[in-house]
Image: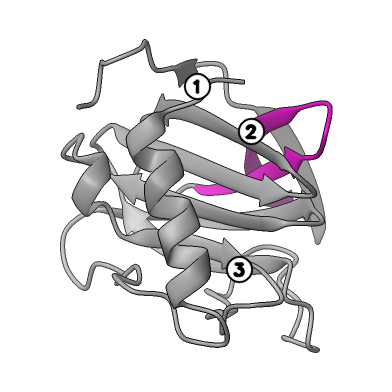
Amino acid sequence: MRKHPSLSCAVLAALTLLTGCAVKNPYISPTSGDTAKIRVVNHSAGTALLYASTTCKVDSAPVLAAFSSFLKSDVSRADMYGSQPNDGNKNVVERVIEAGKEMQIFTAYQGAGVQCYVEVAFNPKKDEQYEMTYIANGQMCRVAIDRLTETDGKIAREKVEDVRRLKKGECR
């Protein structure tokens, strides 16, 4: 778990200012070019913000997913393999993302006096589908990404091997 003072301040400010509000700088799915899909599944009890960028600019990265009882979150679905209708589950979102470019994902978690951050990158492939699991609690802060495939109505998950942790200062 890595701590970033500027991101920490931004998270705390966001939590203070956004209580009961919509997320600022929400993610907007691309409408042209090569795309893929990603489902984000949250396993954290606090407030988790996941930012995504293909330009390595964390300060202006849009919020791919926001999980919090304090924020109004977009929990839309992108018609993925195994997609379920939104039945009020605020811990799952699906997004269309750019493919063929490295995507950097920056996470910030705040819960019960604990803060943690994870920064990873991977290269989504055109027309592929992915599932990202986000786990954050007092002991860990972790991201895992699997590629999804469907054959005869059965969904298979395969760990994405090229997910890499970003080095300190790599995307600043």
Specify whether 160 is left or right of 114: left
Please identify the quadrant where the N terminus is shown.
top right
Please identify the quadrant where the C terminus is shown.
top left
**Image coordinates for residue 30, horizontal then vertical, percent:** 24, 67
**Image coordinates for residue 84, horizontal then vertical, percent:** 76, 77
In front of the other: 170 or 122: 170
Mark 2 vs mark 3, CA separation in Å: 15 Å
- Predominant SS along the magenta part: strand
In front of the other: 27 or 155: 27
Q: Which residue is mark 2?
A: 143
Which region of the structure is painted magenta? 129-152
Q: Residue at x 49, y 87 (%)?
A: 21
| Secondary structure at numbered mark 1 | loop
Specify whether 68 is left or right of 45: left
Q: Which residue is mark 3?
A: 93
The answer to whether any part of residue 56 appears in the image is yes
Q: Which mark is residue 15?
A: none
Q: Quadrant of residue 28?
A: bottom left
